[in-house]
Amino acid sequence: MPSTFCRGVAEPREHPAGTMRTSERTVTVAVEHRTSTPEALLGIAVRIAREAAVTARRMRAEAITDVQTKSTDTDVVTAADRAVERQVVTALAAERPGDGVLGEEYGHSDRTAAGPVRWILDPIDGTVNYLYGLPQYAVSLAAEVDGLVVAGVVHNAATGDEWTAIRGGGARRGERRLSGSVRTTLDQALVATGFGYDPARRAHQGAVVAALLTRVRDIRRFGAASLDLCMAAEGSVDAYFEKGLNPWDHAAGGLVATEAGLRVSGLDGAPAGPDMVVAAPPAIFTALHDALVELDAAGGP
């Protein structure tokens, strides 16, 4: 039978008889072992992401004392990033041992690489925000079946806000169905974006933003791609774009945005990927897309 899962704001506490208490209501979370329907996979993703978010919040005070860098001196990783990823990979391996896992910190797990289902994980999206105590960092977990993302959850570990989506089944924040912004012109659009860590790439991205700023209502930069995509899905911003994203940055959030009715793609017909991710309602997508092409937003280092 399909999993039952909660789409509500989560501050989970375990209760008897397989129930979970959230700030909105009590729901039953069934455990699926062999079913790979999008609904079942989302139920698993929601439960594991909530548990991971608890760990991220708990570890924050100790994790910020153990900070290392990755690609550049500004690209940080904490002990919590690694601990949360290990926790999620372990939970998935125990529940679905035939599945693959692609994670930000440890890469592809060969131990669970055999099946058609692959999980795509960002254990803490927004690590710099996490480091500084800013409330925009999230656990992002998506399920991909035969190369297509079919279910995803983005859970803001700082606030408990949660966005979910099933391919063909819509996107929600809690119980609210999402449908994106109603904005129809680019000049009235509030556009979110992000920046890479390499100084040369940042210089190019800064020039793009400077030129785009005169064509839109304003620009926002929150520092977590998964949350940016979810904010575009719910209309808290009107659109989003960014160069340099990895699969774990946009797998779950991109599905949320798509299922909210946004167009999510790269430029010039390319799929969303490292060269560019653009998410916008159809009414303003073309104008934003064409402006980004004109400004060579996918160019540079």
Image (tube, rainbow, N blue to C red):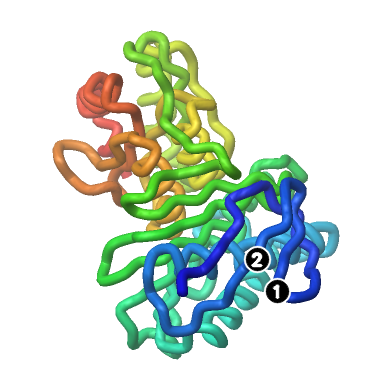
Compared with residue 267, is residue 108 higher up or lower down, i.e. above or below? Answer: below
Q: Which mark is residue 277?
A: none
Q: Quadrant of residue 14?
A: bottom right
Name the kind of residue labelled 1 in the image.
Gly
Residue 31, horizontal then vertical, whole percent: 57, 77
* Residue assigned mark 1: 18
Q: Which of marks 2 and 1 precedes in the sequence?
A: 1
Q: Residue furthest right?
A: 61
Q: Residues within 10 Å of mark 2 (few under 14, many from 20)?
A: some
Q: State the residue in front, 189 or 130.
A: 189
Rendered residue at 25%/19% (across/down)? 287
Residue 251, horizontal then vertical, whole percent: 40, 55
Q: State the residue in front, 244 or 94.
A: 94
Compared with residue 239, is residue 230 higher up or lower down, i.e. above or below? Answer: below
> Could you tell me if the residues under marks 1 and 2 are in contact, i.e. CB atoms within 8 Å?
yes
Q: State the residue in front, 272 or 230.
A: 230
Residue 230, horizontal then vertical, whole percent: 50, 40
